[in-house]
Amino acid sequence: MKNRIKEFRTKLAITQEELAELARVRRETIVFLEQGKYNPSLKLAHDVAKALQTTIDKLFIFD
């Protein structure tokens, strides 16, 4: 699944580590999400979107 996590994270000037803390996951999870190697659960998608001050539908690209 494609996403815009890195784009939103960069706009907010936060690191992967900071995003991981906000979403209560490990930094590696954020890395895998940004690379499209991991499809998040609905809860994780919600937590990441909330941490990035956006919505799931703006953050994730559903093909």
Image (spheres, helix red, strand yellow):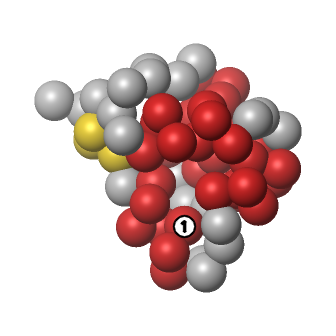
Q: Is residue 19 visible?
A: yes
**Residue drawn at point x = 58 percent, y = 18 percent:** 41
Residue at figure coordinates x 58%, y 42% from the top left: 30
Instruction: Name the residue beneath numbered marker 1.
Output: 9
Q: Tag count in the figure?
A: 1
Quarter occupied by the N terminus: top left
Mark 1 nearby-residue class (10 Å; few <14, some 14–19, many ≥20): some
Between 53 and 37, the residue placed more toward the observer is 37
In-front residue for pair 45/17: 17
Out of 18 and 5, give the one closest to the viewer: 18
Examine the rendering and report whether any part of residue 57 can be seen: no
The x, y position of residue 53, in whole percent, is 64, 65
Q: Is residue 38 above or below residue 21?
A: above
Choose between 30 and 22: the one closer to the eye.
Answer: 30
Q: Is residue 4 above or below residue 26?
A: below
For residue 9, side relative to residue 46 (left or right):
left
> Residue 58: x percent and y percent?
39, 54
Q: Residue 29, located in which quarter of the rendered image?
A: top right
Q: Which element is circle 1 on?
A: helix
Residue displayed at 48% across by 67% down = 8
Instruction: Check disc 1 and give the amino acid type.
Output: Arg
Image x and y of residue 4, in percent: 37, 55
Locate the C terminus and report the quarter of the image it occupies. Answer: top left
Q: Is residue 48 above or below residue 51?
A: above
The spot of residue 59 in percent (x, y) is 42, 51
40 to 51, vertically: above or below: above
Outermost residue to the front: 28
Q: Residue at x 75, y 35 (%)?
A: 26
